[in-house]
């Protein structure tokens, strides 16, 4: 089982950044709803505590404050490109230090955080009626994140 102590400070910061960064990539794909999306990402972290109980790596991640600063990437396109690259680097780091089960759980959790962000705010419609649960741009971002991590995009809730 993998613990925080097996990473140097820079590596641990990178591991913590991944899930929140995935959420930010989705948030930046479409305008509007940032507060709802941030709250939904926080709910994904809360739900994961129960879902991944017993996974030492995720226990350590979930007990730490999420770290991701979108300003270091510039605009949305740089965030997407740089963020996807960073996610790929993080998975490669984890593959060197964590168990295969922990790596897979990290990937699923990261995509789940991004999916929660995408589902938080309906796109289109009028006064909350109609609209799409996930916009085309958000879906594309989700698919790129999942592809980078080598996992499937989970189905939409509700």
Image (tube, rainbow, N blue to C red):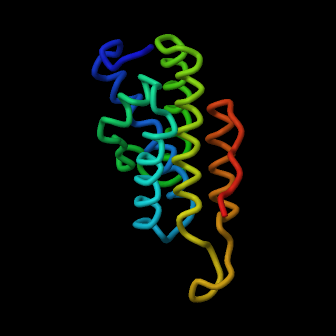
Q: Is residue 56 rendered to the left or right of residue 106?
A: left
Q: Residue furthest bottom?
A: 127
Q: Who is closer to the viewer here, 58 or 127?
A: 58
Q: Position of residue 142 (x, y in %)?
A: 64, 48
Position of 157 relative to 149 (above/below): below
Place residue 66 in its image quadrant: top left
Q: Position of residue 127 (x, y in %)?
A: 57, 88
Q: Who is closer to the viewer here, 94 or 47?
A: 47
Q: Position of residue 153 (x, y in %)?
A: 69, 44
Position of 8 relative to 27 (above/below): above
Q: Which residue is rendered at x = 42% and y = 45% of the image?
A: 73
Q: Is residue 136 rendered to the left or right of residue 61?
A: right
Q: Which residue is rendered at x = 57% and y = 45% of the image?
A: 112
Q: Which residue is rendered at x = 40% and y = 53% of the image?
A: 42
Place residue 156 in its image quadrant: bottom right
Place residue 81 in its image quadrant: top right
Position of 46 relative to 14 (above/below): below
Q: Who is closer to the viewer here, 151 or 89?
A: 151
Q: Is residue 116 rendered to the left or right of residue 60?
A: right
Q: How many marks?
A: 0
Q: Position of residue 57 (x, y in %)?
A: 42, 24
Check the picture and name the quadrant holding the N terminus.
top left
Q: Is residue 44 rendered to the left or right of residue 7?
A: right
Q: Which residue is rendered at x = 44% and y = 67% of the image?
A: 36
Check the picture and name the quadrant holding the C terminus.
bottom right
């Amino acid at each position: 089982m993998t613990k925080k102590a097996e990473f140097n400070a820079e590596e641990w910061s990178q591991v913590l950044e991944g899930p929140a960064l995935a959420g930010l990539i989705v948030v930046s794909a479409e305008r509007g709803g940032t507060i709802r999306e941030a709250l939904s990402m926080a709910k994904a972290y809360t739900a994961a505590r129960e879902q991944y109980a017993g996974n030492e790596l995720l226990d350590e991640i979930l007990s730490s404050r999420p770290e991701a600063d979108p300003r270091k990437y510039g605009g949305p396109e740089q965030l997407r490109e740089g963020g996807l690259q960073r996610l790929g680097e993080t998975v490669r780091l984890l593959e060197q230090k964590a168990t295969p089960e922990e790596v897979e759980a990290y990937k699923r959790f990261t995509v789940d955080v991004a999916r929660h962000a995408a589902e938080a705010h309906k796109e289109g419609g009028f006064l909350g009626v109609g609209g799409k649960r996930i916009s085309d741009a958000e879906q594309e971002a989700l698919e790129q994140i999942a592809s980078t991590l080598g996992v499937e995009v989970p189905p939409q809730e509700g």
